[in-house]
Image (tube, rainbow, N blue to C red):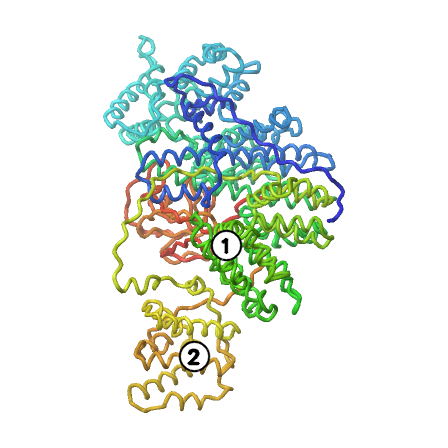
Amino acid sequence: MGCCGSSEEEVTAAPELEADPAPVRPEGDAVTHEMQLADGQKMEMSEVRLQLAAAETNEVAPEHTTFLASVLKARKEYSDDAEIMIDSCKRLQLHNRELKNFVAMADAQAVHEAMNGGFLGNGTNDRKLIAVLCSRTKSQLKRTKKAFFQLYDEDIRKAVKGETGGDYGRMMYYAMQSQSEFIADVIDEACGGLGCDESMLVDLFVMFGQEHLYAGKVAWEGRTDRSLIDYLNSELGIMYKNLRLLILMLLKDVRDEGEEVDEAYCEEAVETLKGECDKGILDAVVGEGFDSNEISELIGKNNIPTNRRIAVLFENKYNKSLVRALDGKCGKRFHATLSGLLLPRPDFIAMRLEAAMKGWTTDKRLLVRLLGGLDGESMIGVNLAYERKYSRPLPHAIRKEISGEGHFELAALVWLKALEEPSRGAETLTEVEVDKHEGDTEALARMLDMLLVENDSLLAFISYLDVETLREAVKGWSVDDTQLIRTLATRSKRFLARVSVGYRKAFQEPLHLLVDEQLSGYYAYLAKFLVVQEAQADSMLLDHALQTPGDADKKALVEFLCARHPRRVRAVKKKWEAANDESLIDKLNDELEGDMRRIALTLLKGKRETDDDDVDADSAVAEEQAATLLDDPSKGIEILCSNSPKQNKALSLVFEDKNDTSLGRHLGSEYSGYVKNALLALLQGQHDWYAASLRAAFRGTGAADKTVCRILGAHDKKDVQLIAKAYEKKYDVTLKSELSRVCKGDYKRLAIAWLELPDQLEQPRHKISLPAVEPEPELEPSPVDEEDPDDEELDDDDENLDNIPSPDSPLYKAKVRKWKRKLEEAESKGKIYKAQYYRRLLMLHPPLPQGNELLAAYKEALTAEYQDGTSGMVQDWLDSVEESEIGDDEGETKSKAVFAEWVQTTQVMIEQKTVTIRECTNYWGLNARKTVEESLKPAKYFEPQYEPEYVVATPEATPEPVLGVAVQEPAAAAPPGTQQLSATVPYGVYGGQTMTITTPSGQVLAVQVPMGLAPGSTFVFQAPLNAPPAAPPPPIIQPTMYQQPAIYQQPVMYQQPVIYQQQPQVVMHGTQNPYYGGWY
């Protein structure tokens, strides 16, 4: 049974990153977040408790809704409850960290494969190496480093250094370091030779703030067991005394890193600086010369905004820059340090990068060192500062300087776009201690917003990795079946839908085409079922059951109709009809007969009871039904097709207890064949029935492999595991052992892997605990309510306008008749609301296009008969309409009989005065003000459709911002009175939000980022040449985010995502730059 393959070895799941040890410390022994990032091993007690809680809650049985759904509900309904917000943030933060660890393990394996030349083991795949290591932030690379140690017991930096060399090797080495390791290594490099390179120390101590410098100090002292201050004292001799004192001051915990500026202090400092700068040689002779220590105190301890203000005040008052005034008063290196402290750090780094690229040759060592120290937000700031200062993008400048340098050029340019990392820049807002916001519900809600954004970004990134993995597994000399099976079998069907969509986007072909081309036999058949969602698998099952006209596969129909949830049955009915342009009810009417037709049509309506509400079976009803079936077994179809699985089980037990025989045997006296099997399926429950079907398939012939593939492949991993439990309980043998016995080769390996391997991206099973909502007290029903208890309950099919066929479709006639029947039923029962609803449907969807001449003539006939009193005018007009006048245009019914039936139905409404002629005029588009509800023609369905589990609503934008458009191709010339500018989206800002832009002429504009763009993307916008004066821009752009809490939509699998409308001031065309770069 099955197809043979080259390997029988079972596939195992990819390894998981081991958790850090959690040492128990006293509660008061606090460690700052920055120190945790520095040493990577310390954890707060709250995180220890969180991991213990996560381990405990993983044992909780899954429920209908997911963990993320509960987080979304908490964010929407309980954002003002600090306790719920803290719980949501902590647990989602932990889940996101698990996803980041998964990425780290995948990256570690990719690096190892790149250094070992893939399958052949020849050379290094440098492009893949760069794509993995240079497109991650340092915090993510820290996880990759740990994963590499766990997998291969080797330092990833040393391993990569051994495979690379020159400037390219140094670039890769710096990129893989954390900032604390980078600082420690630069100190060693600056002081490790025959002398000390003071310029390296100047760059280092100006580039980083005190927190990072202190973390670097801890890292250096930890690996050398020496005091860094003593080391610097010994390396910087008497000639650099002033520089040494300033550097040591920057290491101490005394520098102000805030944003506040004291104007009075700045004015006093200006006078002091002026006094020191005015001192000359004579002052030095008498011992009152230039005081370097006081200058160091004045500049070294200030925050950057204060130093910037001092420099501006000095220049305004004395018509000379402070940098120029200090020149010549102190040593060159000391002066360079003071000058650097007067600038914003991004501006200083941009200045040093420009210096590295000036002259006859490029200082590549300086360039590598400066780029290697950048990360995350600092990378964005330097890019913006460089383009603002030198009017050219930094990547363009670097490409021009090192063009032709091969791998070094590629590594540098990819590193500059390192925001294409898994969390898409959200990590700076999500990797903070949640308890830091305790009591601040607004801050907690903002953090939860970013955690949700980060979660979706991580899942999108992992799907991209899976796409690359699948492509690489099949495009070599041979198919790597182990890698392919592991990728498919350790994901849920929902996530595989992401992968399918991503594969089509990346390679312009559907994923099932790759399966058809590279796999064969039942191995391919099972894989094709796995890569589609459940509704699409059901549609495939229907296609299989009905593929031979006149010979429907009744076993497959029983499998679909009797064991699927009614909601799935309704969803697949719509999809099948959309794909085949045919009524499924009509199809089954033609293909089936007798009791089998009756069962199929009853279950196809999907109206039977379910267990969704966890309502217990009604024992009294079960006894009554048992008595009915004992007397009249022919009632079996009606009863069993209407009951829930619980009710059918209770019925079976009651019948057996009262009559000493099973209900199945009793029904066997009335029914046989597939009808009997269908009723037994309804009695057994879906998992038991699937187990029985698998048992029969294992005992059958080779053709039963299709049944195995359908049952395993059409269900998600959790459902397959429930089927396996039912199988073992019924037959005292595991499903895995049965699959191993009867299946062969890669088909067997895939089937067992889908059954046994865990979903490595599974959400936590325990949801957020929310307060129980007390039910509202029931009101006494009015007499009208007693007569119409369900007047507002509409048919599921009719609530969806996408389900209404076009008049030229064969389904239109059936739809009109259905509305007419339901209208008559509603009117007979006095259901006013329902009757009005179906009248409106009949009027809004005539068998002709809106504004058609026949509709206008029909309206005139109605006016003549019911307003002018000309009796019989409508019928006379209808008789005069020729058959040839109908069906010659698109959107028209092809039959006059259908048109006449609709006319007769709507004429009754006019006659009964339930609809007016004026309403008809509006409904049919016969006046200037058309009120037309357009319905889309169903599209043929082929590819998996993935909808995001949640949609983050964007905050309110600044009133009337300038709208930017993404850069793709050269834009048209700017309109008169405007200038075209480009901008890069800063760290933490996303499409739909606003950012502050300072133009070269000093104008300050609020610019709206185009929808769909993320940090690091570039777009252009039109700025006015003569704008009103505005306040000076802040030194660093800090875009306003989340002016009011974002609202989330409840996750619905097949609901269209929220679309936000923009009112642009400037309309241009363009699309976002590619989201990720591939490995090839």
Position of residue 240 in the picture relative to residue 732 (left or right)? left
Rendering coords of residue 144 (x, y %): 56, 30
Name the one closer to the observer, 480 or 246. 480
Q: How many marks?
A: 2
Give the residue type at disc 1.
Answer: Pro
- Label 1, label 2: how far apart the Cα atoms are: 55 Å
Front residue (pair 373, 519) = 519
Q: Residue at x 47, y 13 (%)?
A: 228
Which residue appears farthest toward the left when viewing the image? 264
**Tag nearer the camera, 1 or 2:** 2
Query: Looking at the picture, which amino acid does disc 2 mark?
Result: Trp
The residue identified by callout 2 is: 902
Q: In the rendered image, is residue 105 in sight?
A: yes
Estimate how packed mark 1 is, as few (under 14), some (14 to 19) or many (20 or more) residues with alpha carbons within 10 Å. few
Q: Which residue is mark 1?
A: 970
Q: Which residue corresponds to the image point at 34% horizontal and 62% vertical from the top-left?
A: 792
In which quarter of the view is residue 384 placed? top left
Q: Position of residue 782 (x, y in %)?
A: 25, 61
**Residue at 39% from the left image edge and 71% from the top image edge:** 825
